[in-house]
Image (tube, rainbow, N blue to C red):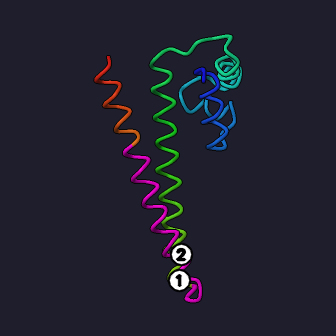
Amino acid sequence: MAIGERIRFIRNLRGMSQKFLGQSIGFSEKTADVRIAQYESGTRTPKDNFIDDISKVVIILIRAGAACRLVFCFIRLMTAEEEALQFKKRIRNTILFYIAAELAFVIKDIAIHYFS
């Protein structure tokens, strides 16, 4: 899978627009969506620091999403006694997903450091 396809896949997976992703990594509002579209189509190749910036944005979004889901589940756990088991499972799954995601990012950093 080419780098542009990976960028598109991750962006779509996280539900981000091209403009949002571009602005999140520092492009101006006018050029953000055009630049990301160029990377995704392969007409332009991103620099290494751009790829690192994308991974940081995705990490932040995963952390924020996991935190929001945990807060929501804890609130529902306290207020909805009949659904307590369901929200306990969601809390456990969110924590396991968060740990797996953090481990993947650490392994990525180790691999990059080792091979560079």
Q: What stretch is highlighted in magenta?
A: 80-103
Q: Is residue 75 left or right of residue 1?
A: left
The location of residue 9, given as percent across then percent down, is 64, 34
- Secondary structure mainly formed by the magenta segment: helix
Residue 8 location, quadrant: top right
Residue 84 lies in magenta, yes or no?
Answer: yes
The location of residue 62, given as percent across then percent down, is 50, 48
Spot the residue most to the front.
Answer: 1
Q: Is residue 45 left or right of residue 106?
A: right
Say which amino acid is labelled 2: Phe
The answer, for residue 22, to whether it is visible in the render is no
Residue 77 lies in magenta, yes or no?
Answer: no
x 52%, y 30%: residue: 54
Q: Which mark is residue 87?
A: 2
To which residue does mark 1 refer?
Answer: 84
Q: Quadrant of the N terminus?
A: top right
The location of residue 91, given as percent across then percent down, is 48, 68
Taking 64 as reference, is 75 above or below it?
A: below
Q: Do the residues labelled 2 and 1 touch (CB within 8 Å)?
A: yes
x 50%, y 52%: residue: 64
